[in-house]
Amino acid sequence: MATTASAPESDSTPQETSSSEISVPANQQGLDPPSSLDLSRSGIFPKVWRHSTEDRNLTLYGFRRFKTSHLVNLRFLEEEIAELDHKIYQAGLSLDDGKWNRKQDRLGLQCSHRDASVPAIKDSITDSVVLRLRSLLKDYDDALASFNKLMAMETFSLIDDEGQSRERNDLHPYEKYKTRLVRADLGSRATHDPFRRGIQKALRRFQYWRTCGNVETEEERGTITRPTRDAKTVSYQDSAFLAGILSRILASLTAGAFMVLPLIMVSYQTRQRDRLITISFWIIGFSLSLSATLRASNLTTTGVVAAYAAVLSVFVSKN
């Protein structure tokens, strides 16, 4: 009697397959599911969209720089590389035959500390160690270069943008005053301008005093309450733009003073020796002031001082 073999029953048909049984790619296993719904529900996307379509440049191009997090990441990488570096040095020192030549010891290996027990080179310098060292060094170099560029970007205080400042309810007003955001639309700060830097600090301080109350002492900073202002009234202060205008005005006035004052003094002097002493005093004062305030190259500083001395010398020679 022939028997008919029935097909093995499956646990579920294609129509009955639940979403939890759908296979997940290997490269996505162990990762959290996409959080697009969570972002929209928690209100993150509306905030992101509002900031990305804002008319004011502070909100549109202002981004957090996460300075401390960058530094922590660099320190972690530094410690990991230091561990591998110590292992490599100890393996290299184990090759020493005891004959050192001071003239050739550029790294000071003769005075290097040696561990009591050093693994064999075949156990310490492996392919995995080399690959890990390459990966860490690449991450470290990229992080250093990125952090250097980040710190050279133009910044502004979070308190300058009161719209974003009000959204950060996790920060104390003084923390907002100290928090720096970067401007993605402006170039890097190539030179150090003390006038501009001082004016920016003053503007930030004024904005903090205006929005959060006057702070006289360090002890009072912990007792400041959030300002009770109209929620619809939001102030913005482009400190970089204002500081640029004011610093240029101040620099031009200072340069004019260095040109006019010595000429006025010389015009009332009759003896040539007194004029030379006065001109020499102003030239030395100008060179010292320029060197102390501006981070210019030696060649640039020398050229500016020479031009200043030439102008004053011409005036003295004609009189």
Image (spheres, helix red, strand yellow):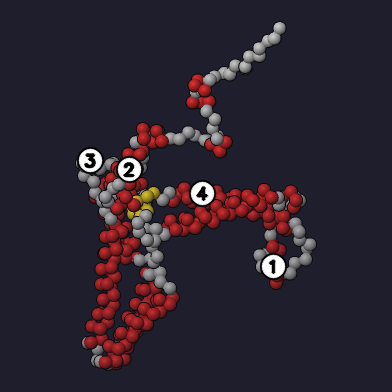
Circle nearer the N terminus (1, 2): 2
The crowd level at tag 1 (other Cα within 10 Å; few <14, some 14-19, many 20+) is few
Q: Position of residue 138 (x, y in %)?
A: 56, 54
Foreground label between 1 and 3: 3
Q: Earlier in the sequence, mark 3 or mark 2?
A: 2
**Residue in the foreground of this view, choosing between 35 and 114:** 35
The x and y percentages for residue 42 are 36, 34
Q: Is residue 207 visible?
A: no
Q: Is residue 58 above or below residue 278?
A: above
Label 3 or label 4, whichever comes before in sequence order: 4
Residue 43 shown left or right of residue 13 in the figure: left
Residue 208: percent from left, percent from top:
28, 50
Which image quadrant: the C terminus? bottom left
Kind of residue indicated by mark 1: Asp
In the rendered image, which residue does mark 3 sit on?
Answer: 231
Mark number, residue 49 = 2
Furthest residue toward top: 1
Gap between marks 2 and 4 measured at Cα: 29 Å
Q: Kindly identify the amino acid type of the residue bearing the numbered disc 4.
A: Asn
Question: What residue is disc 1 on?
Answer: 105
Please state which of the two labelled residues, at mark 2 or mark 4, is closer to the viewer: 2
The residue that mark 4 highlights is 73
- Dot 4: element: helix
Kind of residue sitting beneath label 3: Ala
Alpha-carbon distance for marks 3 and 4?
38 Å
Crowdedness of circle 4 by 10 Å Cα count: few (<14), some, many (20+)? few
Q: Is residue 71 above or below residue 192?
A: above
State if disc 2 and disc 3 touch (CB < 8 Å).
Answer: no
Q: Above or below — where is 105 with respect to 26?
A: below
Q: Nearer the viewer, residue 246 or 133?
A: 133
